Amino acid sequence: MSEALDELVGDVLDLEDIERDIFRGRSPRESLLRVFGGQVAGQAMVAAGRTVDADRDVHSLHGYFLRPGDPFAPIVYEVDRARDGRSFTTRRVTAVQHGETIFTMSASFQRAEEGVEHQAPMPDTPGPDGLPRRDMPPVPPDRPAWTTTGKALTWPLDVRYVDHAPWDESTHRPPRNRVWIRADGKLPDPSEPGGRLLHVCVLTYASDLTLLEAAVFPHVKGGAGARDVSLASLDHAMWFHRPFRADEWLLYVQESPNAGGGRGLATGRLYRDDGTLVASVVQEGLIRRREP
């Protein structure tokens, strides 16, 4: 594993058990000005999953980001065991910091069963080899929205841009974005205890990183890292369709059907490199132009 991935798996997503259905998590040592939304969603999924029988896998989550998280304070996750049925299990998770709720999530788990099948085809896309990585260009110190220090963060993910990247200064970019994404290192096998849940939590973390860029690219130079816009996730939903490994390449096809009213909507589909659709994502985010 890379150092950043090792910290994500061995510390950030390894929540501390405080009491029955109550857990505590922390942010990485290298942090943003506010807690990264994918981190909170991933940690909430860890908390929910620890209260569910091992024969059931998560099939959906629906989360709302209510307040910015403080990256220098722990986050407490409280799990409500809403339902344990014969086929489905439902959990509600509340993330609390400084006595206030910063995030809520509902997650549903299902016992494996057979059913009818179809999927949207994967678009014809160049492979990840040779494509620019997200962490290639340095982040100028006059872009404080990225970090507390002005330097580029070390992400636990390997992200390769197919169409256009956040540092692309071109104009007239369509509200679409394709990236190849995977954990930056080897994860435990899904067959190991807790392995399937870990891969789901890492993908949940990853799903929030680039999605809103599709809503921003047509409007500003530099995309989501531009100085003249501020972004914040409002809600986030995922559906998990088929097995996958988060440490193997997944194509993330992202589109934004609408932006307006200070918000942008983006949808995403995640494919294995063999063309199998493994997950779908929808997110709405706050998009505001900064004051000059």
Image (tube, rainbow, N blue to C red):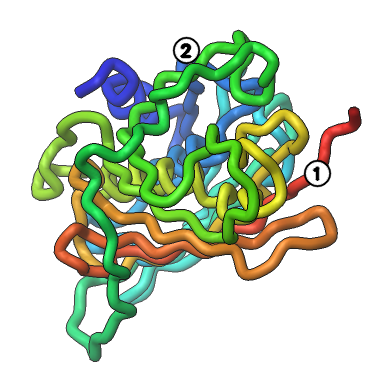
Mark 1 lies on a secondary structure that is: strand
The quadrant in which the N terminus is found is top left
Q: Determine if residue 283 is in view.
A: yes
- Residue at 74% across, 49% down: 286
Residue 12: image x %, image y %? 40, 26
Residue 287: image x %, image y %? 75, 47
Closer to the chain start, of discs 1 and 2, is 2
Classify 10 Å Cα crowding around label 2: few (below 14), some (14-19), many (20 and above). few
Does 16 appear above or below 178?
Answer: above
Circle count:
2
Going by the image, does 147 lie left or right of 190? right
Which residue is disc 1 drawn over?
288
Mark 2 lies on a secondary structure that is: loop
Which residue is disc 2 drawn over?
29
Going by the image, does 178 lie left or right of 282? left
Residue 78: image x %, image y %? 55, 42
